Image (cartoon, grey):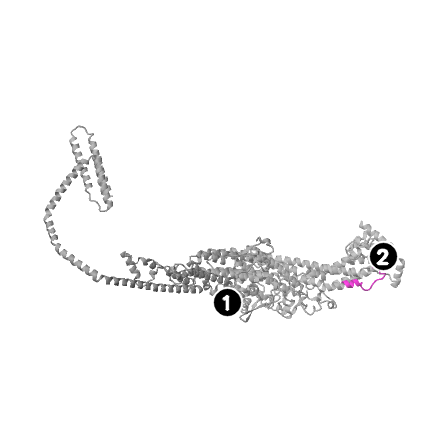
Amino acid sequence: MEETKTNARIQNDIDDDVVDILGAKNVGPTDDAEIIASRSQRRREEAVRRLVNDVHRRPDPSAFQVQSHEWLVASTVATALERGLDKDLHSELVQEAKENSARIGQVCHDHSDAFLASVGRVVALGEPSRELAKTLELANDSLQSNTAGTMLEAAALLEHSKQANQRARTLAGMVTACRNVAVLLDRARKQASLGRPRAALDAVDEARTCLTAPVSSLMLGGTNKNHLNANKNGTSKNSGNSHAENMSLEETPFGCRAMIMLPKIEAEVLNGARRGLNRWFLALRSGGDGAKSGRAVLRKCANSMSVGPGQLGLGGHLPPSYIWRAKVADNLLARCDQKSKVARAVRAGYWFERDGPKEADRLAGLSPPGMERRAEAFSMAFGWYRCWEENAPLMVDISELNLSTENLSGSRHGSRHGSRHGKRGTLSFRGTQRPSGAAKSMNVGQVSTSTSGKEHKRSAWSALLTPAILFEDSPSRIEDDNKLMGLPESVHPVRRAELAFNLLRRSDEFVQYYEQNRFGDMKIGGGGKGDKGGDGKNEQRSSLSSLTGDDVSVGTDRVFFAKSLPHLCASVVGFSAVEAALELGNFADDEDDDRGGRNGGLSTNSASRFRDSSARYERSLVTELGNLLRSRAIGASLAELARASCLMAAFRSALKIVHPSSTTRRLDKELLAMDIDIVMIALKVAQDEQLKVTKKIASEDRKEAMVVTTIDHMNSKKKRPDAIPDEELIGLPFGLHELKQKSSAKMNSLGEVTRNTRYSHAQKDELYTFSKAVPDVVRSIHARAIACAAFTLSQEELGQIYKGSGAAGYVLDCVEACISVAAVGMQDGDAILEEGSVERAVQTMANIAALQHCLPRLFGTLMRGMCHVGMIKPDQLDETFQYTENTRKGAEKACDKQVGHMYNMVYKICCAKIDSHINFALDNFQWVSKAAREIPNAYCEGLIQYLRTVFSSLGPMDEGSRFGLHFSCCGHVAERLVKLLTDPVHGDHQSTSDDGIPPIARIDAYGLKNLALDVYEFERFTDSTGVPQLSECFNELKSLTEALLDRDLPMLLMRENLSFRRKKYPFLSLEKVGNILEKYVGMGLGDKLMGTMGTNQKQPEILTMEKKEVQQLLRMVRSQEQ
């Protein structure tokens, strides 16, 4: 690089000189010619000097630099030739050569003496050198002849010994290496059989290293060093042994067999890992380990939810939890407006200072803290134990209603005044035969369970509202808790299998295998009769079935809600718990140390790679569970829906607690929250069940009014301060004890009447207006309302959003629907119409009226309960009370409708009986009697006896309905007799109406006299009933008979005597008089004589007319009609 720069610089100088020389030519022949010539000469000399310096530059020793110097000399010469400086350069070089030659001669002359002296000394050493050479030759000959053979033999022996030693050491190393390989293989097999992949694969790696390493590396001592020194010295003595020293155990027969065994051991490690995974999968699925852990989590979460923060939940510590809630509800209700009936009824039957502590103490003795106490507190908040006996049947779960009549009444009234009927039928709807040894029906007060040989009586409410899986006294509780506590250690098969696959660089295969067996789904619903040809049109894929190993599409709704749903929830929670344990990575194997191995930097917490797959699978499980519950809810009962909602609320809480880091937690609300359809389904189910239960109760009711017992009478007569409301009468709550019949003596003045009726005890015992079916129906409505409230509250906990009056509005709608269908079911209309029993119809009507009477206090009790459990917010209080009042009015209207219907039914039955009696008694009756009777006709006495029986059975009715039915029956009798008397008779003697018998065809004065006597008897009977103005029903009939018997009738029928006629007989109709006159049989002269002789020649008191007189009066009447 420096030479290049120098040449460039020289080239530039030469170019400048050339330019100067050439430029000088342009100068004219002036005085500056000499200056230009001298300058050109100087520049030329400098250029030649530079070329000389380049030629004499000292060359570099390297070949490349020598070639460069020669190239530089050639380049310099070429440059000189090109510029015309070759002669100058030659002369300059010749001059320098001469000078150098002279300088060398001078140097040689100056040092010639010293050189000659040194040469003389060298020549002097020639003789000693010859003698030394002779001595060396003699020594060499002696060495060759006397010592060399012995030394060669010793050297050969030494070489042989070294080779033998080398072979011995190599053999020892080979034996030791083979032994080590055998030990490592044996260790690898044992570790693989023990399921320890790291130790097994480490042994495999060490064995492979020993097999593939050169034999020289296995030798002891310095053999390897000698081998290296030999290579450095370039000797070829060990060249024949180089292959032997570089040989490995892999090339030996033992090594070949060992190398074949290594992949087998690795495969055995993988197979062992797969077997461990399969056993783990089988334990989770068929063994139920996941479901057991899930049950423990569900139980703990449900218990925590019931106890609440600070143990102030419904199932928390007593008495603070219950007393605090009761006081808050009491203060909240004290602020509501008292204008509506429900607002005033809220205060009836409850006083906080009296009932609050009493209920708290009772609740503490009923159940321990937890879900069981929560259910009891929930029912107690709705006033169940204030209104009913503790062992009273709930009659909510109708699938369990297979009890006799005696068990249906849980109150002391029902047990004291219960029916004495024989065996009754059972409900067959949604009912299945219970296996032998199973627990009794949930309708009894308590359900017995056995835990560890100790019998525990669980209350009916806890069994109704709480799934069995959430109880703390479950028989499998200890086993489930142990499974949950050992869950972090139970995932070691996954850890070891993952470690084995990762150490063998097959992690992708492990991921695929794990996801296929853990996150798979299975086919359900396909391959049946509906799937013809196997086209798979009906095929469905289910993740839940894959998780549990059971087909979730089979089984009835009863089996699903009783067994399948709890197991599915427990399995999904167990799945989340296992995934959380895998994600935490808190399992530490006893072999996971810091030894390194083939993959020493591998982290044991590698389960995070499955997080996305696990989240997707968990989301599919929760989604399928929600869809399955929604589809099964259509065929569920209210009790099953309530328990399922409670279970799902605990299920969602368990998912939040056991695996909070899952991305599915953000979607649980949308996946599990049931839409509004499930609430409407619950309302419809409650309505249908209430109708069926009410019909069963009504069909087994004897329709006899309950007797007021001495205890009831004493309780109702207790006097308390005006500021303290009376307690609810247990068995007859909500004001039912106030509905008592009035004394029957006011209705029946004749003593002999009561002897022929089934109310012969009425003068001895005081009766209620309702039968024993009313408390049972009211209790079933009350219990069903509590169950609906529990269901609605659980739905709200699941994320259900209620508009308007909130969750309370749906509970009130359910109560209104239940009351409406209960009023319909209490009629038992078909049986009443078939039997034609007025007493049953009247009692049914009174029962519906009694149900209507207790509605305000029932709604008030429910409102207090909903405030107690927190279903009504303070800002929704007024709106909810207004909605409650509207709901109560709707329920009362439904009851009014059914009461009116029953009133019409009673009237129809009475009319049918009256018509039947009249048709039977007056068929072919002879009204032409020729003589007057002293006693009423037989039909009159029969009708009066029937009416007296009917009126005596109207005691359960209210006074207005009872008086109305009196007027209706008497009016029907009078109307029927008037029609028989006044309806015209056609040629065929058939009536123009649909009555059973034709009207009277012939009647004489004595027949009218006897009819007037019957009318008098009817009036006498109506006056005896005590109903004011009841006798006026017969005014028209009385006017007709008296007018036709009045001797002044011909004068009164004259046109000019119209005012007198109307004044004397205001109800008299000329048309009807004319119809009677057409039927009137006149008396001849002989009849008059015979009548006069029969009366001892006394003038008769009645009007008797001849045929011509009758015709005259008839023409007079018809003329006035026109």
The residue indicated by pointer 2 is 1081
In this picture, residue 991 sits left or right of residue 791: right
In this picture, residue 494 sits left or right of residue 692: left
Look at the image and say whether residue 929 sits in the magenta stretch.
yes
**Magenta stretch?**
927-943
Name the residue at 54% across, 71% down. Answer: 454
Look at the image and say whether residue 761 sits in the magenta stretch.
no
Q: Eyeballing the image, is 72 above or below 315? A: above
Name the residue at 38% across, 65% down. Answer: 179
Q: Eyeballing the image, is 437 above or below 507? A: below
| Prevalent SS, magenta region | loop
- Callout 2, which amino acid? Val
Q: Position of residue 1108 (x, y in %)?
A: 87, 54
**Spatial CA span between label 2 and label 1:** 103 Å
The residue indicated by pointer 1 is 479
Q: Residue furthest bottom?
A: 453
Structural crowding at the residue carrying mark 2, measured as other residues with C-alpha within 10 Å and reported as few (<14), some (14–19) or many (≥20): many
The secondary element bearing badge 2 is classed as loop
Q: Which one is nearer the viewer's eye here, 834 or 587?
A: 587
Q: Nearer the viewer, mark 2 or mark 1?
A: 1
The secondary element bearing badge 1 is classed as helix
The image quadrant of residue 338 is bottom right
The image quadrant of residue 933 is bottom right
Q: Is residue 202 visible?
A: no
Q: Residue furthest left?
A: 113
- Callout 1, which amino acid? Glu
